Image: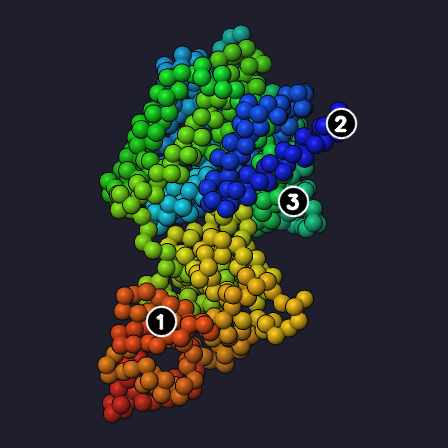
Amino acid sequence: MSENIVLMLASIGVLSLFCQWLAWRLKMPAILFLLAGGIAAGPLLNWLEPQALFGDLLFPLVSLAVAVILFEGSLTLDYAEIKGHGKMVRNLVPVGSIVTCAVGTLAAHWALDISWEVALLFGAISVVTGPTVIAPLLRTVKPAAKLANILRWEGIIIDPVGALLAVLVFEGIVSWGQGNVFGHSLYIFAKTIAIGTILGAAAGWLTGIALRKHLIPQYLHNAGTLTFMLGVYALSNEMAHESGLLTVTVMGIWMANMKHVPIESILEFKESLSVLLISALFIILAARVEFAAIAELGWGLVVVLAVLLLVARPVSIFLSAIGTTLNWREKLFLSWVAPRGIVAAAVSALFAFQLQDIGYESAGVLVPLVFMVIITTVTLQSLTARPVARLLGVAEPADYGFLILGANSAARQLGQALQKVDVPVVLTDTNWENVRQARMDNLHVYFGNPVSEHASTHLDLTGIGNLLVISPYKQLNSLATYHFLDWFGNGSVYSLSEGDQDQKARHQTAEKIQQTRGLFGDMSYAKLASMVSKGYSVKTTQLSDAFTYEDFQKQYDHQAILLFVIDTRERIHAVTAEKNLKPEKGWVLVSLVPPQKLKERKEKDVSPEKPTGENTAQANT
């Protein structure tokens, strides 16, 4: 018997990993494959029976997993980021939450004939979209940058806010059910809110102080924070029934808004946790879904789905857009995209268990209803959002921009030169000083590891379809090359030479990475950095009949190094060892020029006898 249990647990882990891998390969939200895998393993094949496998431990495990999800989501709720992302996002979070909750409540109550309490809880749960489903969808759809930012930040912010709303509604329902009179129910609700808020704030402050003052060693930051959070969750539930979810949400929000608290590593810790814990959780929850329960919803399910998609979301968008500069096409696109995600699935399962225990029989419809909302919105919108964006004319043009791995001096000069010729650029680096300098140069930048889970949510790649590896970090260079070869494809990832092609096989990098080498004519990072430190600078030059490529070469005594060329069709080409480019009239050259020749050019500019074709308006970076 014990061997069967071990085999079953290991199989759940393998299945969850396969679903994550499949989602990565197909560039779709992982939750879609996790739910499909759970349904296949459960009701379809009858291979996985969670209740029989876990017994009395099922509810505690789900409860702890939901606490982890809510805590991680609340760690992303930075008030400063809310203020910095436009009027539409600030409007959409409160207005969209209220409208979606109200419309979803009315639709569920009237179409499915369920109690007002359960309908209200469904309305609150249906508010949550979440970055785990929005980010993969945006990478596939590639809408205009403004719309992508609105959807991305709505997902990040609404994740903990919507979960908090659902928790508050649930606490109100539970406290009301425990009281025989209005006053007693109100007292229990107030007690739950007070304990959750005070204990959560205190726990967040203590944890933040411990991390900020290095009272916990670095290697215990992730494990210590997670363990302490789970302990506070359990303590809160002991003090007030089911107040733990509110406590951990407040704890995460408090830590996210404390100054100088290193929470980045804690957020990255979610990468392993999502595979080992959260992924398995959704397979287990999906395995409990019964087709009979879905069939019992009948046409009422169709009505609820139609109302959420065609009424609640459009009304939320058009009300929130009052006073903004969005046009009707942009509003229609935003009205169509609102997939539900992980928090909705986890919270609905947990609350359904609880409500059924205290006598709300209609709570049984909550899980199949929410799961059908998730499956419908993720599938339908993943398949149709790209055609809708093109039809409305809000799709981003070709992804000709560059993600530059490295924000060092050479990368910054190159980024500025590309920006001046209207090529989208994003720099990423793990060195804070480099990132700070890039921000001072008005460059778009991401601070962190570009292949991390955090980057998959927060790194905005709208308009970006190429990678330039200009970094001294060899291990990160290889990881990023592998990662973005799958995202951008062959021919869109370029890296500097690292001088290992002549080494023995055991010291060489993989052939797949070797094929990306040769950027700027087999130049190494060491050579590039050395040239920049000696005064070489990146310039842009316009060729013409009066100033040909031969004239350009002579002007710099053949010492200038060609980096990029932009042809007359405004297509940009990276110069590599394999490409034999011959610049023509009308092309724009982006090149690295020596400091001495720059001085000589300035001296020649004093005399009008020999004009040049150097584009001085675009030259200084």
Distance Cα–Cα, label 3 vs label 2: 31 Å
Residue found at x 65% / y 44%: 222
The amino acid pointed to by label 2 is Ser
Looking at the picture, tell me which residue is in the foreground, 74 or 148: 148
For this view, does 170 lie left or right of residue 505? left
What is the C-alpha distance between the residues marked 2 and 1? 65 Å
- At a point 47% along the width and 53% down the height, the residue shown is 487
- Up-down relation of residue 386 to residue 466 (above or below): above
Left of 370 or right of it: where is 306?
Answer: left
Q: Which mark is residue 222?
A: 3
Residue 179 at x, y percent in the picture: 54, 10
Assign a secondary structure to mark 2: helix
Q: Identify the disc placed on residue 2.
A: 2
Residue 17 position by quadrant:
top right
What is the x, y in percent for residue 233?
Answer: 63, 30
Residue denoted by label 1:
565
Q: Quadrant of the C terminus?
A: bottom left
Left or right of 235 in this view: 167: left
The quadrant the N terminus occupies is top right
Looking at the picture, which amino acid does disc 1 mark? Val
Residue furthest to the top in view is 180
Give the image's coloring scheme. Answer: rainbow
Q: Amino acid at mark 3?
A: Asn
Of the two numbered discs 3 and 2 in the rendering, the one whose residue sits closer to the viewer: 2
Could you classify mark 2 by the number of other residues whose Cα lies within 10 Å: few (under 14), some (14-19), or many (20 or more)?
few
Query: Helix, strand, or loop for circle 1?
Result: strand
- Few, some or many residues within 10 Å of mark 3 (<14, 14–19, 20+): some
Q: Position of residue 237 (x, y in %)?
A: 63, 24
